[in-house]
Amino acid sequence: MSKEMELVQKLIKKYGTNNPFRLCSALGYAVYHVPLTGVRGFFQHYAHKNIVYLSSDLTEQEAAFVCAHEIGHALLHGKVNTLYMATGTFLKTTPYEREADRFAICLLYPDDTELLPYCDCCIDQISAALNLPQQLCQWRCSQVSRWV
């Protein structure tokens, strides 16, 4: 089991939800839908508060994924300013983004049985159905015992 899934399972057990917005509420994170340019969302720890900013032009499904992704950053990389790293330095943020994406798909689809209807589908079809990147869908499907 991946570290992202282990963390998701602990959170679901503790807070009783995999809904990213309810999880933010349970964790005491403020969520703001604001006009953003160049990013779909970001996490900020400021003045002893945890804040998730989401672009106001996201669909409900996109907002849920981005919110879950930002929770991933908060919990997995809380001490790392990935937004600054991506925009203000030449440091690679890809490993952080990959972990946050994996956390997000695990949070949104924590139960393998939710993915079983897609077992006979190709990654293109799964990606289109879930409205998520192919590479991320392929990774999550590799975690499901039916596919392994």
Image (cartoon, grey):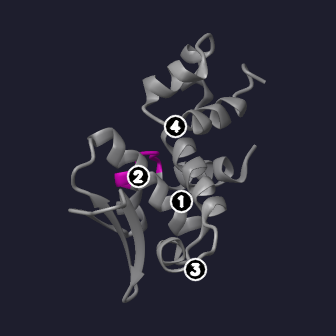
Q: Which residue position is annotated with label 2?
A: 66
Q: Which residue is drawn at 37% across and 46% down?
A: 64
Distance CA(mark 2)–CA(mark 4): 13 Å
Distance CA(mark 3)–CA(mark 2): 19 Å
Q: Tell which circle, 1 or 3, labels the residue nearer the N-terminal end.
A: 1
The magenta region covers 16-22
Is 54 drawn above or below residue 120 in the view shown? below
Q: Which residue position is annotated with label 3?
A: 79
Determine crowd level at label 3: few under 14, some 14-19, many 20+ residues with C-alpha closer than 10 A: few
Residue 36 lies, in percent from the top left, at: 26, 63
**Helix, strand or loop under label 2:** helix
Distance CA(mark 4)–CA(mark 1): 17 Å
Q: In this view, does 23 lie to the left or right of 56?
A: right
Q: Are marks 3 and 2 in contact (CB under 8 Å)?
A: no
Q: Tell which circle, 3 or 2, labels the residue nearer the N-terminal end.
A: 2
Q: Which residue is drawn at 45% across and 25% down?
A: 128
Amino acid on which disc 3 is placed: Lys
Residue 11 lies, in percent from the top left, at: 55, 55
Amino acid on which disc 4 is placed: Pro
Q: Which residue position is annotated with label 4?
A: 133
Is 12 drawn above or below residue 44 in the view shown? above
Q: Residue 29 carries which label?
A: none
Is 11 drawn above or below residue 89 in the view shown? above
Distance CA(mark 1)–CA(mark 3): 12 Å
Distance CA(mark 3)–CA(mark 4): 27 Å
**Helix, strand or loop under label 3:** loop
Q: Tell which circle, 4 or 1, labels the residue nearer the N-terminal end.
A: 1
Q: Is residue 135 left or right of residue 132?
A: right
Amino acid on which disc 1 is placed: Gly
Q: Are marks 1 and 2 in contact (CB under 8 Å)?
A: no
